[in-house]
Image (tube, grey):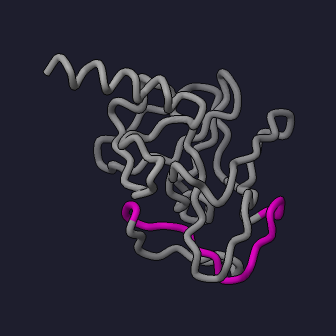
Amino acid sequence: MSNGDVVTRPSAISGQGLFATRTFSPGEIIAPYLGKVLTSRPVKSSESSATYILEIKPGLWIDGSDIQNPARSANHSCEPTAELVLNETETFANLRASSHILPGDEITFDYGFSLSESLFNPCTCGKMSCPGKIIAEPLRPALRRHLRFIRRRD
């Protein structure tokens, strides 16, 4: 999958990843997150381990599973190169560069998972700041405290 500015290819983080084919400056829009807007939470299919559901606001989701959605291949990272910018009134989202991205760099963003979601989603970004679970950056200290408590008891 390619839109000219990005390409999907195998990633060291997980499965397929989204990679830049040109330089992006901080604040620049990389790609839209495209898909059907849903008013009820979709049920995850057991056929695929991949999930492309994006919650825009309570009661509103984008199903980004369509292959025409270039942003669906962006992996999570604890030190992301991009951010997902939601537009709640227009029901869409864009990936926007949060740092300088060079051609060949993997484009990643923070999936923003809650503490409970993180417990079932290991992170393989490989960054020094990674707690080993996919979790929103502001919640990482709480997760680290939780994991230290569990490890002491085991």
Along the viewing direction, whichever of 126 and 40 lies nearer the viewer? 126
Percent of width and height locating residue 69: 62, 61
Along the viewing direction, whichever of 151 and 32 lies nearer the viewer? 151
| Point 25% across, 20% down: residue | 150
Considering the whole magenta stretch, tell me its main secondary structure: loop
| Point 58% across, 46% down: residue | 110
For this view, does 15 lie left or right of residue 23? left
Percent of width and height locating residue 29: 80, 62
Along the viewing direction, whichever of 22 and 55 lies nearer the viewer? 22
Compared to residue 147, the image places residue 86 above or below, namely below
Residue 21 is a magenta residue: yes
| Point 60% across, 55% down: residue | 80
For this view, does 34 lie left or right of residue 73? right
Quarter containing the C terminus: top left
| Point 76% across, 41% down: residue | 86
Q: How many marks?
A: 0
Along the viewing direction, whichever of 6 and 51 lies nearer the viewer? 6
Residue 46 picture quarter: top left
For this view, does 76 lie left or right of residue 91? left
Q: Which residues lie in the magenta part?
A: 13-29
Quarter containing the N terminus: bottom right
Percent of width and height locating residue 135: 49, 36
Residue 27 is a magenta residue: yes
Percent of width and height locating residue 93: 74, 47
Q: Residue furthest left?
A: 154
For this view, does 33 lie left or right of residue 132? right
